[in-house]
Amino acid sequence: QLGALCFLCNLENSRSTSEGAPVSGTIIPRDSYRQRAYIEPLGIYLQADTGSFESIKFDFDHKNPRLQVQFAEAASTYHTRRLRVEKVATSRPGHGFQVTAPSGVQTVRGAYEFPAIEASISLTWAYGPGTQMEENQRLYI
């Protein structure tokens, strides 16, 4: 068993089940652009339309699941950050993704928009009946 796999990134502070399934951790992108990440256990694709990712913290706790996307320092070329969250694998658990912080985030043309002065955005979701992640679920990023 390989456990959690992270491609073009580092996985830090990872906590896993005895089966090797990820429970929580921090993804540090190491590719050139740092603007996209696919979180396989949820089947979601994150894309920064403006800015780049510094890190992505995840916690797949079934009572309080969350993702926190930390952005790199804002450039002077934009005043608004845009993050797209696309559910591309409907067979994966998780639905109803919502922003919990910062407040006042709006959805514009399919992306969450918030001021560039805000360095991070937090998301939560519901697993729903019968959609909990399996114990042996892998993390591919």
Image (tube, rainbow, N blue to C red):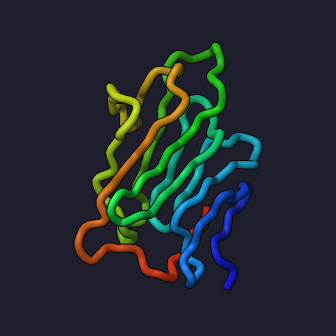
Q: Is residue 15 left or right of residue 89?
A: right
Give percent across and percent down for residue 139.
57, 69
110 w.r.t. 113: above or below: below
Tell which of 7 and 12 is nearer to you. 12
Give percent across and percent down for residue 76.
64, 13
Total labels: the figure holds 0
Tell which of 86 and 27 is nearer to you. 27
- Residue visible at 27% across and 77% down? 130
Quadrant of the rendered structure where residue 92 is? bottom left
Pick the quarter of the image with the N terminus.
bottom right
105 w.r.t. 35: above or below: above
Give percent across and percent down for residue 112.
40, 34
Pick the quarter of the image with the C terminus.
bottom right
35 w.r.t. 60: above or below: above
- Residue visible at 48% across and 68% down? 41
Quadrant of the rendered structure where residue 62 is? bottom left
Q: Residue furthest left?
A: 129
- Residue visible at 51% across and 77% down? 137
Give percent across and percent down for residue 50.
56, 29
Q: Is residue 104 left or right of residue 49?
A: left
Q: Is residue 133 left or right of residue 131?
A: right
